[in-house]
Image (cartoon, coloured by chain):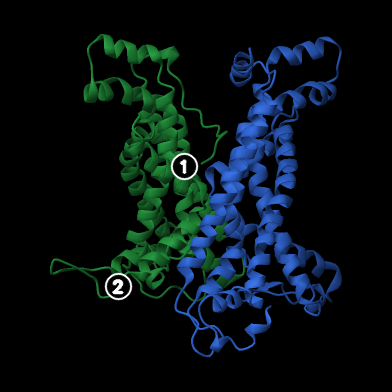
Amino acid sequence: MSDSCTQIIADYAFRSLGYGERLLPRSDFTLCHEFTLIGSGLIWNVYFGTLALLFGFFFATGLALAKAAPSAALRRPAELFIFVFRGSPLFIQFFLAYELLVMLPKAGIDVFGITIETAWTTRAWAGALFVLFLNTSAYSAEIFYGALQSVPKGDIEAADAYGLTGWTKFRRVLWPTMLRLAWPSYTNEAIFLFHATTLVFFSGFPAFQQRGDALYYAKFFADKTFNPFIPYPITAFYFILVTLALIGLFGIVNRRLNRHLPGHHRPKLRIRPQIIR
Amino acid sequence: MFDFCADPKTLEGLSWLMCYLTTGKHMMFYSSFFVVLALMLIVAPVALAFGFGGAIAARSPIAPLRWLGKTYTSMVRGIPDIVFFLFVPVAMDQGLEYLRYLYKCPHDGTPVWANNEFSVCAAAKLPLSTSPQIWHEVYGFALAVIAFAIVFGAFAANVLYGAMNAVPRAQLETAEAYGMSPAQVRRRVLIPQMWTYALPGLSNLWMILIKATPLLFLLGVEDIVYWARELGATKSQIYDYPHPDWRFWYVLALLVFYLGMTKLSELALDRLSARLSKGQATMAGEAQRKAAA
């Protein structure tokens, strides 16, 4: 049995990326099949989550600063962006983005004689990632904005007293304090962003050649076997692992952010979400 | 709807649009908005009750009950809600049909789960295949409500558990000093005091509930997303009202609907929060007092 399981892993471990066996199993589904394929799908969840979070972090910092800016020309667009993406369901955003991207001319757009391909934008790896990026940026920006508003007055006055201005003041005083204050909520946002990645293949974006995420394969097994009691708990198990890994990683960053404090004052990263996305 | 709609092919411009937007299918689209509103209004109190149970259980002195409560409150933190939305309706459906199978079906040795099929005899089906279509829809909707209530109950349990812990310890001790039993302390002091601490979390939860309603579509309920896709899809000349792919515009209308819903809720919840923090020894209450003075 273990021998055939290694075979299954070899065949299906990268099925979600298009490597290995082309056809999905049709009958005799074993636990090994389910663990391997759902795990294979998890690659997509990690891909979407990690990249959206990474790009979103920088955009969100910019958005938070824009929202806190005194100039209305900067503040209004940031407020509108955050309102639209926080006020509407991600599911609808996926649909809308997909329909919008499908409307782009199939042949590509001609810009100064160079044809820009558009077909790839309707594929999940690009289109859905873009939506997730914008979505998490809006949520994180609101978190960062809230933290920026709570930076202690004394810190800013101390920075002024040292003669720090502009970029230096931001990089050395405002930004680290903002991150420190925002970190517990931001960890929460990261966890729920990873959960949100399961929506990708259930909204507008089709799973090209049945290359889907963890939940896509879980539903595949549940539909084929009429037994929801195995594939969904496996998916749950994988996501609990992802969540624990995220809490661990963000905890390390949290320790680094608070390293200036003496040991017993260092706030532990406590994830008790009162506010969820 | 209107008399002049009798022959749609001859219509143009505004009258075409008026006739188009009042077809029978569009009426069903509009009424599906009430399905969404009904879902939210039913789920909110049920989830609150689930959350209450979860929070009380998580604080229970009886260890197994406490573990159960803690597991319930923490499960939504590790597992995506969509997994529950897909799992719970199917599992509930199979569980109920299995229970009915036990006393309604002849036991001739046919297994229930066999050959990748779940099948019970016709008498145990839920709802019966002879029952009218409306019952199938009600049943599907009820399963969706249960799935939503379980997930949002767990979120609410988290919020309420936090709020109960935020009530100053001294108040509970005072109540105990007056000789109140644990149940009395809970009912007379803990629960009335916790709302102001729970409100931010609960309002946030209401917002999430609004934004989770399009997931009804995944559960096979004919909700607004279903109709938007159905009506927006390309209609060829064999239809009364042919048009190209308009799904984008329909989904855009849904987006506007949701933005309106969240904006309205935000305004209402802000007023409620101002009302609840009146006279409270919190920052918001203090700010109100100073503004009035």
Nearer the camera: disc 2 or disc 1? 2
Please, which chain is the residue tagged with disc 1 on? A
Q: Is residue A188 left or right of residue A119?
A: right
Q: Which residue is mark 2?
A: A105
Is B47 or A1 nearer to us in this picture?
Answer: B47
**In the displayed structure, would residue B20 be above or below residue A15?**
below
Q: Which mark is residue B125?
A: none
Q: Regarding mark 2 in the picture, which secondary structure is present there?
A: loop
Residue sitting at 43 percent across and 57 percent down? A39
Query: Where does the image place residue A186, in percent across and percent down from the top left?
Result: 43, 35
Q: Earlier in the sequence, mark 2 or mark 1?
A: 2
Chain B rendering hue: blue
Q: Residue at x 72, y 73 (%)?
A: B111
Please provide percent x and percent y for residue B94: 71, 65
Q: Would you place residue B151 above or below residue B199 in this image?
A: below
Q: Position of residue B116 (x, y in %)?
A: 60, 74
Residue B169 visible in the displayed image? yes
Residue that badge 1 annotates: A191
Q: Is residue A84 above or below residue B97?
A: above
* Residue A43 visible in image: no
The amino acid type, in three-letter code, at marker 2 is Pro
Instruction: Say which amino acid is labelled 1.
Output: Ile
Out of B75 and B248, give the one closest to the viewer: B248
